[in-house]
Amino acid sequence: MTQRNIDRRALLRMGGALSVLGAGGSLALQLAAAGSAAAATATDYKAIVCVFMFGGNDGHNTVLATDSDSWGRYWSARWTGQDPIALMPVGTPPTALGQVSPVTGRKVAAANPEAWGGVLPIVPSVAQPIPPGTNATVRTFGLHPFLGPLQTLFNRRRLAVVANLGTLIQPITKAQFLPGSPLLPSNLFSHNDQQSIWQSGMAEGARFGWGGAMADLLYGQNGVNSAFTSISSSGGAVFLAGRSTGQYAISPGGQPATFINGAYAATLFGSATGPATVSAVVQDTGSSSDFANNYAGVVTRSINAAGTISQAVSQGAATTVLPPPSYKSPITGLTQPNVLAQQFQAVAELIAAAPNLGLKRQIFFLGMPSFDTHAGQNAAQPDLLGQLAQAFAYFDATLSNLGGVDQSASVTTFTASDFGRAFTTNGTGADHGWGSHHFVMGGAVKGGRLYGQYPTLGVDLGGFSNPDMAGNTLIPTTSVDQYGATLGAWLGVPPSSLPAIFPNLGNFGASNLGFV
C-alpha cells in the first residue's frame, strides 16, 4: 500500500495548521469545523463504495423499458447495421450456438444477442409515471440478460436503479441543447472531462472531488487513523482528493504496494536480509540533502501506514472473507479472475478491520475499464456486465456475514461512468452519449424501485418528437449532484455543507433522491 499526502494531513491534524491551505483554506476551515461537530455524535460505522465504469457504459442495454411502445423504438434504432446490438425481448429463450434464431432468422454465435435469451424482467414496487411521448398505460422494465444476480438483488429489494442520470448544471430542455451552450457541462462527450466532472464537478484538471470533500468533513471521526478515510484500488482518483485529506492507494488485490518492509516479504532478490536493508536505506534521514530527508520521511510514513493497516486486517475478520469465484465468460468460454470482485474482497477486509483502526466513516473508489464500446459491443459489454453482476452479488453476500456480523446496512455501493451512449447503433456499437442508468446496492437501500424518471425512448422520425432526446442523445433528468448529495446525507454529511460540495444542487427541485 502507498500513502498519498499523509505528511500534509499530519500537519493539518497534529499541528492544527489549517491556514496553510491558502486559497482553499476558507472552505476547508468550514468543512473541518462541521466535521468536528459531527465527530462528537458518530457511534456507528458507514461507508460508501463508488464503482466507476471507465469508458461510458451503454445504459440503453443495461436497464431497458420493455413496454411495447418503448421496445419498438428501441428495436428499430438498434437492430440494424453490420452487428446489431439490440437485445432480445423478455421471455425469449436462448438460441443454441450454430442454430438459426426464430427471432432474427440468422445462425447464432456466442457474441450474438440471440444466444443470451431475452432481457430479464424487473417489476418496480412503485410504478413509474408515463412520460410525455410514451404511448403506454403501464411502463415495464428489464435488465441485460447477463445481470441475473442484479435481478435477484432488485427482487430482494437490496438494489435500486437511478434512471437517466448525468452531469448537469441545471435542468435543461431539448430546445436548450445547443452546441456551446453555457447550460451544458464542459466538453460533454470527452472521456477525461466527463470522468472528472462526474467525480469533482469540474472538467479535467480538477484538484478536488466530492468524495474527498465528504472526507474533509468526516475524517475527524476516524481518530489517529484518519489517513484511511479515503481508499482507492484504482490508482489516484480525483473523486477522493480533498483539501485536507488525501487518498490511500491499495492494489486491486488489496496487497500493500510497499513490499520492502520485512513484514510483507521474507526475501528480496533471494536475500533474507534484503527487505530490512532496503527499508533502512530508503528511510534514512541522515542525508545532507533536505529533499532526500523529506522524501525519506514520506516513505517512512508510507511504510508505517502499510504496517498499521496490514496488522489491523490480520487481526480483523479477514479470515472470514472468502475469495471471490472466478468468472467464466459465456462469450469466450474462458475462465478468468473477476478483478472487480477481487477489489471488493479487499474492501470487505478493510471494513472488517475498521474497528481495530477506530474508523467510523470510509469512502472507497473502485474501477472497471473498457466500457468504451464504439465497436464490438456484443463481445465486450455483456462480459463486463456479467463480471459487475457477479462482483456485486459476491460483495453483498460477503457483507451479510462479515465475521459473523451483517454489515450490509452499513455500506452503500453505487455505480458511476463517464456518460451513457448514443441511442442508435453505429453498426457494431454505440458512440458517446449523455444520460444513463445506474445501480445503488446495500442493506440500507430502499431497493426494488426505479428512482428518477425513466425517459421516453426513440429518435425523432415520421412525426414523432421525443422531448427527452436531442438527436440520438439522451438528456439527463437527474443530476450527479442529487445522486452524490443523497449518498452524502446518508453518510452523515451535515445538510448545510452539501451546497458547498455540490454548488449546482440548488438548481434542482430535490436534493435527496430518497433511495437510501
Image: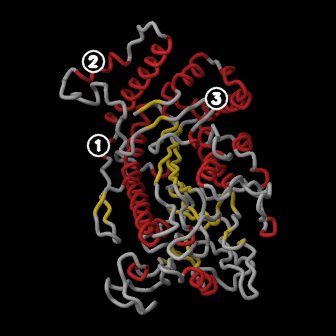
Amino acid carrying label 2: it is Thr
From the image, state whether disc 1 or disc 2 is nearer to you: 2
Q: CA distance from mark 3 to mark 2?
A: 41 Å
Which quarter of the rendered picture does the C terminus lie within?
A: bottom right
Question: Residue 418 shows which numbered tag?
Answer: none
Residue bearing mark 2: 277
* Front position in the image: 494 or 2: 2
Q: Residue at x 69, y 20 (%)?
A: 19
Dot 1: few (<14), some (14–19), or many (≥20) neighbours within 10 Å?
some
First along the sequence among labels 1 and 2 = 2
- Tag 1 secondary structure: helix
Check disc 3 and report the residue beneath it.
Answer: 36
> Is 5 placed above or below 129 here?
above
For label 1, the residue is 319
Q: Nearer the viewer, mark 3 or mark 2?
A: 2
Which kind of residue does numbered mark 3 sit on? Ser
